[in-house]
Image (tube, rainbow, N blue to C red):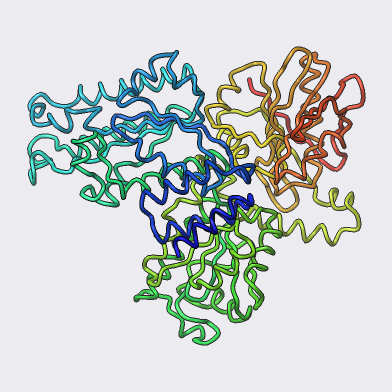
Amino acid sequence: MTRENRTAFQVALQRGDFYRAVQEARELLDRDPGLRQWSYIRKMVDSATNGKEHLKVLRVALLSSFSIEFIHDVLAAQAFLNGIRLDLYQAGYAQYRQEILNPASDLFAFRPDLVILAIEGKDFVPELYSTYLDMVDAGFDSVLERAVEELKGLVQAFRKHSDATLLFHSFAMPQVRHMGILDGHVGIGQGLLIHRLNGKIYDLANAHRGMYILDYEGLVSRFGSNHWYDQRMDHYAKAPISHPMLPRLGEEYMKFLRALTGKSKKCLVVDLDNTLWGGVIGEDGIHGIKLGPEYPGSAYRSFQEAILRLYKRGIILAVASKNNPSDVDEVFEKHPHMILRKEHFTHMEVNWGPKSDSLEAIARRLNIGLEHAVLVDDNPVECKEVLSKHPMVKAILLPRQPEHYEEALLREGLFDALAYSVEDRRRGELYRQRAVAEEFRTSSGSMEEFYRDLAMEATFAEVDINSMARTAQLTQKTNQFNTTTVRYTEAEVAQRMGDPDWYLLTVQVRDRFGDNGIVGVAMGRTKGKVLDIDTFLLSCRVIGRTIETAMLERMCEEAKSRSLQYVTGRIIPTAKNVPVRDLFERHGFVLVNEGPAGETTWRMDLEGDIPSYPSWLKIVGTKIKD
């Protein structure tokens, strides 16, 4: 079967069928997860000539205190599985200080999007590891202070020359405590010291935009240090991580890479029978299904609690189940041990049709791409049917034992993001508001009547410290109504905030159904007599409500206040941003250039007619920074 899978994988790559190639590659790795398989996948992907338009290029630099080159194949192959093409830079062995402190280093010439700083604690702070016993009498306050100050100096030096996201490993515990069972009883123990140092590192990251911590301590603990480390290879080649653990480290990196490139998943679609509860409701009845304080019902209840936590983090929940709607309604309404309620789900497809059709209906209802959906199901036939029609869907086939469901759902970190905003906490509510508004649209006599009856109010504001994370998040996640689809980190947004040539605008929208939060971002830069719009995007929740017209009016007003003559903007076509393609044309901009790949540049003369605020949209505030 491995040979057949390889053939199918190669054929899909040759055809440029990216999503099918990903599915075949995943099957290959399920059968053989060894490093040779990862190397094979990377080699085939690198040699492929088709389908690369689906891959987001990301420039990643690896700096380390140990040999980490063995992870290259794993990381490049995992990136492919997530729609990313890596351009990797590997610094010389233990050269991270020189690379960061030298402005003319190859690191800065590489211009990375992400820099991974992988440092083993024993290399950076030997006093807490190999020479711990020599320091017990003297104390460790100066050791911790020196370590934090050095790291702070490295971060500050790095920021002088790069806006790239910086990812730093926390420090793992030593495999053996020098005081044995007396660790922490005689002086300050190694464990407590390393915990303190890691806490200070998190404080440092929170004080510097664009710096994140990979929980290396937790990662090693999860798999066990005896499995994680290879002492022989550490002594022989300064390569301490055992080869079977490299994919696990790659998975942790991938959580950050997905978030940086807008590849994080948005919607969790769950089955019901033998997924949210044990048994089949149509056969076992409400009193016969397994859900409650005793096993296995307790495991299903714990799984629901895990899903509810995702909901509270801003993940959209939906249901795709082959069932009788009345039976499902009875469970949600009357079962005393249900954690999840119907109001947690933005949409429910409960019918006897193919689940592929249900997934398509859910995506259409929510106005999201299927590549942003994750299906969780206990039935391999259902998963296969969905993937055969929609290979871009991520399908998680649940293991046999329900106590392992949560780990299967969360292991890859498919829903992880680099920010957590007010809009995230309210996302389920916001999508329900959108669904009600769409139903309201169908009952309106005309579009203008619909717009007026919505009673929309817009508040414009320049990006500030409170909206910076949401601004970066929208650039990373918005695909459909996005003129350029360029992703930005918080550090890059912060740099623009401090540059007077840049104008960074957000728009917050309320309507009769509630507050939609910040739903739009526009960024423009003064260039001579021109305000050049670099970024212009709207959340899918408010597409088709003329908010974009008001945003363009505000950008033109800003350009006039700067005594400029023109406003320009670009459209870079992607597979997803069809809704924004005619933005500038239908607002009176003139086409001035068209590139070979279809990218277009448009210009508005401010002495002529400029877009006007729609009469049905009330502008309730324009907040300008001091």
Q: Quadrant of the C terminus?
A: top right
User: As displayed, is residue 521 above or below residue 244?
Assistant: above
Q: Quadrant of the N terminus?
A: bottom left
Residue in the picture at 55% in, 68% down: 384
User: As displayed, is residue 592 above or below residue 432?
Assistant: above
To which quarter of the image does residue 385 belong? bottom right
Q: How many marks?
A: 0
Determine whether, in the image, residue 410 is placed left or right of residue 479: left
User: As displayed, is residue 305 above or below residue 292?
Assistant: above
User: As displayed, is residue 603 above or below residue 426?
Assistant: above
Q: Position of residue 440 (x, y in %)?
A: 80, 59
Determine whether, in the image, residue 592 is placed left or right of residue 394: right
Determine whether, in the image, residue 115 is placed left or right of residue 518: left
Q: Position of residue 32 (x, y in %)?
A: 39, 58
Residue 249 visible? The answer is: yes
Residue in the picture at 24% in, 34% down: 237
- Front in this rendered view, residue 450 or 571: 571
Residue in the picture at 89% in, 49% down: 448
Q: Position of residue 311 (x, y in %)?
A: 53, 56
